[in-house]
Image (cartoon, rainbow, N blue to C red):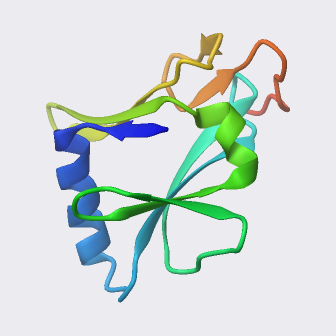
Amino acid sequence: MIEVSDTASDKIVEILSSADIQNAFLRVGVDEGGCSGLSYTLIVDEQQAEEDIVLNKKQFKILVHANSIPYIDGLEIDYEESGMLGGFTMNNPNAKVSCGCGASFRMANYRGEVKKCD
């Protein structure tokens, strides 16, 4: 459902460890907004909802709300460093259009509400 590269996994483990939350998860989801209409959300969370699907990775768990599954099924998460900057990259086979910064996307059958990217 969601693939995570080794580099991204290492970074996620680092982030979850530094969060100082006992049972921290990485929550992956989708919100309306961004210059293409839908934007990815990656947050550290400790609350698991009944509608969440838990994906067990080697060193951590990912939570995905069931409503986000149609938008991110097959998502590949990577982490790239470039000079002094770095960040997560998303390769989404469901996206028909992605913005230049990679933070938002559009699907053929759902565009979302277009908003300026942060």
Q: Residue at x 17, y 41 (%)?
A: 7
Q: Is residue 17 left or right of residue 42?
A: left
- The single residue placed furthest to the bottom in the displayed view is 22
Q: x and y percent of residue 75 in the render?
A: 48, 31
Q: Quadrant of the C terminus?
A: top right
Residue 66: tell me if it is visible. Answer: yes
- What residue sits 23% from the left and 58% below the top? 58
The x, y position of residue 116, in whole percent, is 71, 33
Q: Quadrant of residue 113?
A: top right
Q: How many marks?
A: 0
Q: Is residue 88 above or below residue 109?
A: below
Is residue 41 positioned above or below 5 on the image? Answer: below
Judge from the rendering whether residue 40 lies leftward or rightward of residue 88; answer left or right.
right
- The location of residue 39, given as percent across then percent down, is 64, 37
On the image, the x and y values in percent for residue 117 come to 63, 35
The residue closer to the viewer here, 78 or 60, is 60
At a point 24% along the width and 50% down the height, the residue shown is 9
Residue 118 can be seen in this image? no
Give the quarter of the image for residue 105.
top right
Question: Picture quarter containing residue 104?
Answer: top right
Residue 32 is left or right of residue 55, and the answer is: right
The residue depicted at 58 percent of the width and 80 percent of the height is 47
Work out whether 58 lies above or below 100.
below
Q: Of residues 82 and 62, which is closer to you in this image?
A: 62
